[in-house]
Amino acid sequence: MSETAVEAIILAINALGCGIPLFVSGVAQKIMNDMEPLEFKKFMNILGRAAMSDPFAVAIATIPLFAIIYYFVAFGFAHRWFTAGIVIWMIGASITKITNLPIYNWVGKPENTDPEILREKRRMLALGNASRAWLTLLSVVLMACQFSAQGTVIAAAACAIMAYPSLWLARKYMPTSQ
């Protein structure tokens, strides 16, 4: 398989995986922030179990590791944009393991029910989720630059331009509880 084909596969998997942390930090986190601390604890336990048993989420988190090892063994580090994207992706994944995993473990313990500490854990989780989401998105952009930096900038601008009317319409016509 050619280097370009392997890069395209890794980029596609990374782009698919990017949606998960963006959804969690952008949508699910807002729901968690509106919960009472003990509701947040219950939700986190359910979310953690569901995420660890979902084949898609597990595959999207695991496959890139094997693909990246293969890529570096087979092709080395010559493609700097792509290598930078991989490094940023790995930093984002490490942040999740360093910051979020201990929070999931702490919240999962039945004896941990202090509302103030749960609020602090929720705040820390939001920071970890947002960091992971933005770093993963940055890694996708950097990897895409390997194919064409100019094309990546144009595609990103086009996506932003196309998304704006959707966001505006959603805010205008979606009922709010406020």
Image: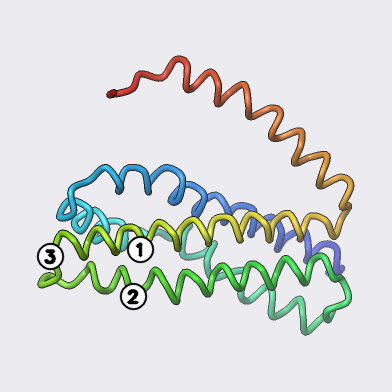
Q: Which residue is mark 2?
A: 102
Q: Based on the displayed image, in which of its 4 quarters is residue 158 positioned?
A: top right
Is the C-beta separation of discs 3 and 1 under 8 Å? no
Q: Which of the labelled discs sits on residue 34, or is there none?
A: none
Q: Position of residue 156 (x, y in %)?
A: 75, 41
Q: In this view of the protein, which residue sits in the foreground, 55 or 130?
A: 130
Q: Residues within 10 Å of mark 1 (few under 14, many from 20)?
A: few
Q: In this view of the protein, which residue sits in the foreground, 52 or 92?
A: 92
Quadrant where the N terminus lies? bottom right
Instruction: Name the residue: 62% across, 21% down.
Output: 165
Which is in the foreground here, disc 3 or disc 1?
A: 3
Q: Residues within 10 Å of mark 3 (few under 14, many from 20)?
A: some
Q: Position of residue 161 (x, y in %)?
A: 71, 29
Instruction: Name the residue: 76% across, 59% down.
Output: 142
Q: Which residue is mark 1?
A: 53
Dot 3 or dot 1, earlier in sequence: 1
Q: Is residue 58 left or right of residue 161?
A: left
